[in-house]
Image (cartoon, rainbow, N blue to C red):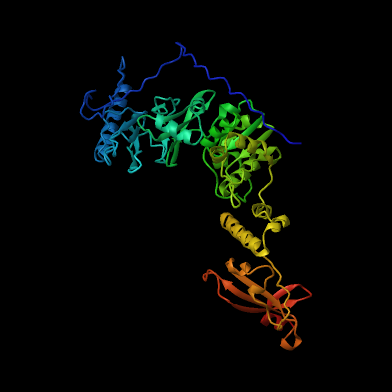
Amino acid sequence: MPFLLTSLPPPPPCQPTKTSSNLPSFSISAFSTKPVSINSGHNNGFPCLSHVRTSKTTADMDEAEEEGAVFTKLRQKMDSRGVKIDSCTPGLYDLLVCPKCNGGQSMQRSLSFHVGQNWSYAMWRCFDTRCGWAGQVVTNSRKPFPGGNLHGQINSNSPSTRESLRLEVLGEELVDYFAGRMISKETLQRNKVMQVSGQKKIIAFTYRQNGLLVGCKYRTIEKKFWQDRGTEKMLYGLDDITEADEIIIVEGEIDKLSIEEAGYYNCASVPGGAPQTVSIKELPSVDKDVSFQYLWNCKDYLDKASRIILATDGDIPGQALAEELSRRLGRERCWQVNWPEKDELSSFKDANEVLKNLGAAALRDAINGAKPYESHDFTSNLLRYCFISLPILHDRTETEYVSKMLTKVKRFAQHHACLVWFVAHSRQLHNWIRGPPNMYDISGSAHFINKWDNGILIHRNRDPEAGPLDTVQVCVRKVRNKVIGTIGDAFLFYNRITSEYMNIDAASQKR
């Protein structure tokens, strides 16, 4: 019995949380070896914030002295790299002028600079696409640098905020970019898609839970990705599947937005893309399943769903992701989307490609047409990929059909990095001279030898005058890549009792 997903109404907008006057307040104390003026010529336009304590204990003074020494050391290291940090505030992200590219052609503050609490480390990256300068500096502090990925950013223990991440509303340039991908401004606003302040080409997909900002994933128009480091891994769009009985899982944030344009809000995206291959090992324990930790972190949300539709990309990594997800979520409740055909040789890759090229209705039909999930089997995939069936022959000659079929099978093997063997009989040989046939004697078409990389013939002697009848001749007649072998013949003995092939010399010793 087929199931159809119903279009769910958008969830109500999150109400702003009220702040209580009883909540404790926190302040960040920044210390320097000398007073820093807000109007200092080295402040890059960002004033240094300091909070004065009303009373100082001996411990406070010791800590301030130690912190001042660490600051001096960090400043010296950064001065040697051309970066002035007098105006920076620990725990926040500052946008400075990159000393390597001086802001590029646009003369913007393209250097995203972050200083850890207590001046214990600094990390930076220039987001000018022609520069990309990145680095990190660690001081010998009692609070060591958390380690890491230069593409990421440090997530402090305090909750992320729009201000701490320096986010702003999407500008017209990025709104137009999404419009070109058929994503409306309303969808962007509902999902709170933003951009990095002062960076018109850096998209910020905000990850939220219960309406609160818990992380951020960044993307440039050129498809470079990075994420807040230290952020708990979770699905993008988590609040949209809180009470959903049916869930759609896609492979990217833009695909999530695309599914929403088709009318479905019960959709979430994996945060980190797809694996290249399916693991052949047993599933690891939850604490060691690092690559799929986001599933376990969202387990309570996923356990409520009776049906999960896997709408991952149609390429090999996308298929591998679907398989890995089904292993963890339970194949019995997983369904899979097959994207519409683009032409005779390929299909659309993902939800956004379908939306852009065929429209929201076609994307909706693809989701509604999801089938119960089946584990990926190369044989069934190969047959499905080639449309291998008899009716295809009625408008074509056998030669045309074989040529097209072989092209598609070869492309399938290249895409899946697998070896495909064709076993074929020779055509009827009216003038047989009792020797092995050649590759052009394969029934159907000369394309069998022209299009394939290797050709091997197996011939058993049937002429008593030519030699033993149990001798099998293996004829290697084509080797495109000379690294794997050469053209030549090998003679084997076939043991009819054990059904074994063996070397002639070994066979003669056994006789």
Taking the view exactly as shown, the residue that stands out farthest to the right is: 497
Relative to 482, residue 385 above or below = above
Q: Is residue 180 above or below residue 316?
A: above
Query: Which quarter of the picture shows residue 113?
Result: top left
Q: Residue at x 58, y 22 (%)?
A: 11
x, y percent for residue 15? 52, 17
Q: Is residue 188 above or below residue 504?
A: above
Residue furthest toward the front?
Answer: 395
Q: Please indicate, yes or no, whether residue 330 appears anywhere in the rendered image.
A: no
* Image-based side of 476 in relation to 434, left or right: left
Outermost residue to the top:
21
Please name whichever residue, 290 or 476, is drawn nearer the observer in this view of the structure.
476
Q: Quadrant of the C terminus?
A: bottom right
From the viewer's perspective, tell me whether residue 351 is left or right of residue 392: left
Q: Residue 503, how many percent across, how many down?
A: 67, 78
Return the residue found at the far left.
Answer: 41
Residue depicted at x 44% and y 10%? 21
Instruction: Work out whether residue 394 or residue 199 is closer to the camera in this orientation and state it.
Output: 394
| Quadrant of the frame with the N terminus | top right
Q: Is residue 213 left or right of residue 386?
A: left
Picture mark count: 0
Q: Is residue 362 left or right of residue 29?
A: right
Q: Residue at x 59, y 35 (%)?
A: 296
How far from the left and from the top, in percent, is residue 488? 59, 78
Q: Quadrant of residue 350?
A: top right
Residue 103 on image: x %, y %: 29, 37
